[in-house]
Image: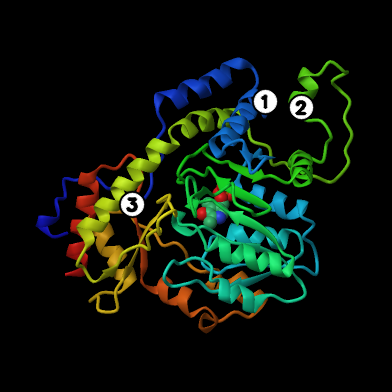
Amino acid sequence: MPAETSPALPFLPFALPEIGEEEIAEVVDALRSGWVTTGPKTRQFEGDFAAFLGDETRGERVHCIAVNSATAGLHLALEALGIGPGDEVITTTHTFTATAEVVRYLGADVKLVDIDPATLNICPKAVEAAITPRTKALMPVHYAGLAADMPALLALARKHGLKVVEDAAHALPTTCEGRLVGTLDSDATVFSFYANKTITTGEGGMLVTRDDALAKRAKLMRLHGMNRDAFDRYTAKVPSWYYEVVAPGFKYNLTDIAAALGIQQLKRAQAFYEQRCRLAAAYDEALAGLPVILPPKGRPGHQHAWHLYVLRLAEGAAIGRDRFIEKLFEQGVGCSVHYIPLHLHRYWRDRYGLKPEMFPHSQHAFERMVSLPLYTRMGIADVERVARAVRVALA
Ligand SMILES: *Cc1c(COP(=O)(O)O)cnc(C)c1O
């Protein structure tokens, strides 16, 4: 390690959650209460989340259904929409495998499409070209926290009679044309509270919908297809032992221990968002003029949640992406890549005979992209340190 790279600085990891005393106290309260699985804290978290989104959207009540992961929420949404064998669901190749795997859980097929290189989000033109008579649904991902082109995608869905399930794992709080993701005109929206997301419950997710029938089915399938959950049976006036199984459901409920974390994290979501914006702006300033492409920005009315800060090395950069990441690591800076596109993973490649040439924009972006550390426990000095390491690596 060169002497000038400050070996005294501790390693700066790629991601860290911010858990405060309020979260710890709320979790302890759940632990002391005697009720640790789905119960009052989960109900409160669902209610708080609905309030965060505005309770009602254009006169319709918002249902918030807490689940033990976003993956579970995506699965429940597609199941409730009746997706099954013979159906096709279109999503972006530039995502985490969870977005696509849930389609396969249901025996339906995944049609992966390319991204718009300007936004790194799913390309509506590519979506339109991929629609067949078997297509039943679209799954946009709000990549990095920037909303996908929802007006174009929703117009396509209306024209072709398709359902829309938004993967909003990165998108709390993201807006599209001034409206919060979670209140748009899709059928369902799913948020993630995984450890590195903008708020966390350790593991967890929230399925949001204004479709009463979808909500009813998802709540049933969240817990074994039983028509009463344990807390309902515990608190009800009728005999507590009786319930009926009406479908082969799943085990996707959130614990009250996790929901306790969520209640307090959600209160901080706006402050977290503001800190992420400050850090992203500091990166933009510190990295200006280097042979890199800075992350795409939201247009007015498109608030970027800044879950990820994704840099791309410019054509003229003197170094490749893999070596660049090694050089940052040597200087004590962790980073990551979002994502190794699905078309390069063995399962997706082999099942659908995919080739990189089918996804030129995703492939090109992948080969030169790196996600820099961006989390609320960082300060501006950390951003400046990362920017110095970037400059050294590019020199
Ligand atoms: C994190 C993530 C998921 C899965 O979220 P879990 O809560 O871990 O299931 C899905 N899609 C995207 C784009 C993600 O980043």
> What whole-number distance in Å separates the C-alpha atoms at marks 1 and 3?
35 Å
Q: How many numbered marks does the figure carry? A: 3
Q: Which of marks 1 and 2 is nearer the N terminus?
A: 1
Nearer the observer, 296 or 194: 296
Residue found at x 20% / y 51%: 385
Q: Does the residue labelled 2 lie within 8 Å of ligand 1?
A: no
Mark 1 crowdedness (10 Å alpha carbons): few <14, some 14-19, many ≥20: many
Q: Which image quarter: residue 346?
A: bottom right
Q: Which image quarter: residue 127?
A: bottom right
Q: Is residue 378 above or below residue 344?
A: above
Looking at the rendered image, the quarter that the C terminus falls into is bottom left
Give the residue number, with chain letter if any, for mark 3: 373
Q: What residue type is labelled 3?
A: Pro
Percent from the top left, x then y, of residue 188? 66, 51
Q: Earlier in the sequence, mark 3 or mark 2?
A: 2
Q: What element carries label 3?
A: loop
Percent from the top left, x then y, of residue 29? 54, 18
In screen coordinates, is 323 left or right of 146? left
In screen coordinates, is 216 left or right of 365? right
Q: Is mark 1 on a helix, strand or loop?
A: loop
Give the residue number, with chain letter if any, for mark 1: 39
Q: What residue type is labelled 2?
A: Ala
Give the residue number, with chain letter if any, for mark 2: 230
Q: Colour scheme used in the picture?
A: rainbow
Q: Which amino acid does label 1 sit on?
A: Gly
